[in-house]
Structure formats: C-alpha cells, structure tokens
Image (spheres, helix red, strand yellow):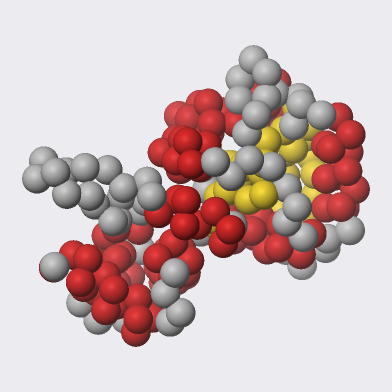
C-alpha cells in the first residue's frame, strides 16, 4: 500500500483552511500535514514537514501565493505549489505561471477535481482550470521580431516535449530522446493538451507543428 500524498494548506482565512482540510480528509490517499496563514508561515511549515504538494491561496498578507511559489521553487524545487483562488484575472494567472506554479484552480473546484489536480502535480504534471486556461494562453510575450509567441505559456520542459510531439514522436521516443521517464512525458503531453485546448494528440501535433514552423 503506497503512502498518502502529504499536503500543506496555506490560506489567510482559518475557516477556509479548516474546510479544505475536512474536504481532503475524505479523499483516500491524501493527508494534510501542515497549515499556514500566509507565505512566510508556509515557508517554515514546508521546511518542517516537506509535503508532497503545497496548496495555497493567491491573495494573502505579508507574502502572497505568487511570491511563495517563487521562494518554494528556490528553496524546495521538488515541491510543487498548486494555487487556489477566487480570482481569475489575467495578471494573477500570468504572475502565477511565470513564478513557476504547478497549477491554478478556482476555489469552487469540486473535491474530486481538486484531488485529481493534487495527484497530477505530485506526479510532475501541471493543472490549469479550464475556465482560466484561455487567460493563461494570453501570457504570450513579444519576441525580437515584434510577433507574439503562442507557446510562451509553456514551461521549458513542456516546450522540449512539444517540439518532439510536433515531429510525430511517441511518448517512448520522446522519453528516450530527452532522457525522461515515460510517465513524465505523458504528464507533459497532458499539460500540452490542456493548455493548447487540443482534443487529442493528432490535433495537438498539427497545432504545435504550425506554431513551431509557421
């Protein structure tokens, strides 16, 4: 029997922290091991408990979720931070992803979807609520030619996988070429499907080929 995924909850509203803890306590295979009211407290909790996933609010006093993501990325690069918020405005989404968040969900996400998101980011994947995915895609930045890069929303690892998918490579071939576990490649491909709104891998490959080769 595998060990449960260990979660740290970070939210400045105690009632919400307790509510989330109660909800997650009903999910098999997930255990809440620490609580914090803001990013500063969270850093100490994370160092003490070394959770598998940090679930944090975006808007908090002293240190918000976006800054927490950046600090955790530097201090604990192996611990993903999944941001949970009521806000879906573009600067928040863009700032979260730019900082290196493993995912971005809205607070009205169902318990089942939240649990699945936690499992996904714990396995190395990335999760973006479909309702804010379109906003995330507007994180395009201008390149020296003045044109926008439609793949700016991707992480470096996802872009490397995207280049291989565009060439029609299988997950096994990509794993061998990039020296990655095949499961890791599968997670990256799933993230690509979500971020680019492709219904299947064939459409994804065609979309990526057009984006990368014009």
Q: Is residue 151 above or below residue 165?
A: above
Residue 139 vs residue 160, the one in the foreground? 139
Q: Is residue 187 visible?
A: no
Please state which of residues 182 and 109 is positioned toward the viewer in this rendering: 109
Name the foreground residue: 183 vs 135: 135
Left or right of residue 20: residue 83: left
- Find residue 213 and report its horizontal and vertical position in percent: 13, 68
Asked if residue 136 is positioned above or below residue 115 in the image, the reply reads: above
**Count of number-bearing discs:** 0
In the picture, measured across the screen, residue 194 lies left or right of residue 83, that is left
- Kindly identify the residue that appears in the image at 82 percent across and 29 percent down: 13
Occupied quadrant, residue 49: top right
Q: Is residue 172 left or right of residue 142?
A: right
Question: Image quarter for residue 89?
Answer: top right
Residue found at x 89% / y 34%: 15
Quarter of the rendering occupied by the C terminus: bottom left
Residue ID at (86%, 29%): 14
Give the x, y percent position of residue 50. 65, 36
Please report the residue visible at 41 percent of the width from the left and 38 percent of the height from the top: 98
Instruction: Residue 83: give x, y in percent of width and height.
Output: 61, 42
Specify the farthest residue to the top: 62
Q: List the single residue furthest toward the bottom.
A: 202
Q: Position of residue 135 (x, y in %)?
A: 47, 51
């Amino acid at each position: 029997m595998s060990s449960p995924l260990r979660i740290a909850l970070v939210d400045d509203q105690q009632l919400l922290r307790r509510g989330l803890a109660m909800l997650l306590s009903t999910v098999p295979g997930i255990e809440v091991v620490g609580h914090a009211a803001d990013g500063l407290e969270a850093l100490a909790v994370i160092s003490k408990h070394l959770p598998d996933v940090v679930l944090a609010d975006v808007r908090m006093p002293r240190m918000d979720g976006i800054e927490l993501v950046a600090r955790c990325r530097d201090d604990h690069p192996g611990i993903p931070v999944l941001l949970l918020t009521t806000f879906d405005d573009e600067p928040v989404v863009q700032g979260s992803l730019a900082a290196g968040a493993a995912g971005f969900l809205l607070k009205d996400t169902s318990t089942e979807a939240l649990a699945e998101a936690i499992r996904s980011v714990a396995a190395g994947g990335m999760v973006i609520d479909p309702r804010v995915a379109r906003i995330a895609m507007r994180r395009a930045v201008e390149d020296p030619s003045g044109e926008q890069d439609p793949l700016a929303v991707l992480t470096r690892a996802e872009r490397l996988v995207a280049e291989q998918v565009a060439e029609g490579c299988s997950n096994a071939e990509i794993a061998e070429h990039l020296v990655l576990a095949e499961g890791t490649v599968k997670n990256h491909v799933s993230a690509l499907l979500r971020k680019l709104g492709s219904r299947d891998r064939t459409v994804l490959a065609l979309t990526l080929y057009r984006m990368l080769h014009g």
